[in-house]
Image (cartoon, rainbow, N blue to C red):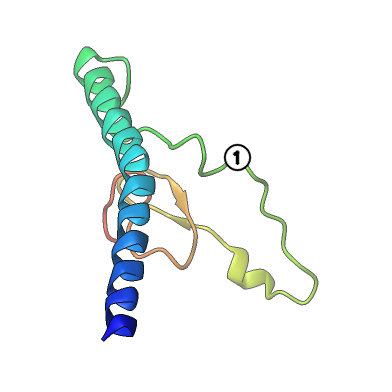
Amino acid sequence: MALEQLHAALIGVLLLIAVGVSIPVLGRIVRDGLERRRKRQAGELERYSEDEEYDRAARTPRPGDDPTANRRVTCRECGTKNDPAFTYCRHCTTPL
């Protein structure tokens, strides 16, 4: 019986640690979303603005990659170039 109690206590402690770690992350996500909403309402940010993190790193093809696989798909609504694997435009969410 003591082994089951130890196991349950260990799982409880791990769950509390996971919740404790996730609360600050979720708080930052909520604050970022509220800040973006405020900026959009104030006209400081477009509704479909680019995410600064998305295109920060340059993507270079590796040797042996299919060159046709790196072609971008252009959205017919807004003209944004999207990865060929995308189903929806990353800028306006129109189906590609």
Q: In the displayed structure, does residue 52 sit left or right of residue 15?
A: right
Q: Quadrant of the N terminus?
A: bottom left
Image coords of residue 49 (percent x, y): 37, 32
Residue placed at 66% from the left, 53% from the top? 59
Looking at the image, which residue sits at the far right?
A: 63
Q: Residue at x 41, y 63 (%)?
A: 86
**Secondary structure under the numbered disc 1 in the rendered image:** loop
- At 68% from the left and 70% from the top, the residue drawn is 67
Nearest the eye: 76 or 15: 15
User: Which residue is identified by label 1?
Assistant: 56
Report the amino acid beneath label 1. Arg
From this viewpoint, is residue 66 visible?
A: yes
Q: Position of residue 26 (x, y in %)?
A: 30, 42
Q: Say left or right for 71 vs 62.
A: left
Rendered-image quadrant of the C terminus: bottom left
Which residue, as the protein is rendered here, is positioned at the far front?
2
Q: Is residue 80 above or below residue 15?
A: above
* Residue 36 position within the rendered picture, expressed as x and y whole percent measured from the top left: 29, 26
**Drawn side of residue 90 relative to residue 84, left or right:** left
Q: Where is residue 48, by image quadrant?
A: top left
Considering depth in this image, is 68 or 52 the residue closer to the camera? 52
Above or below, 37 against 51 in this view is above
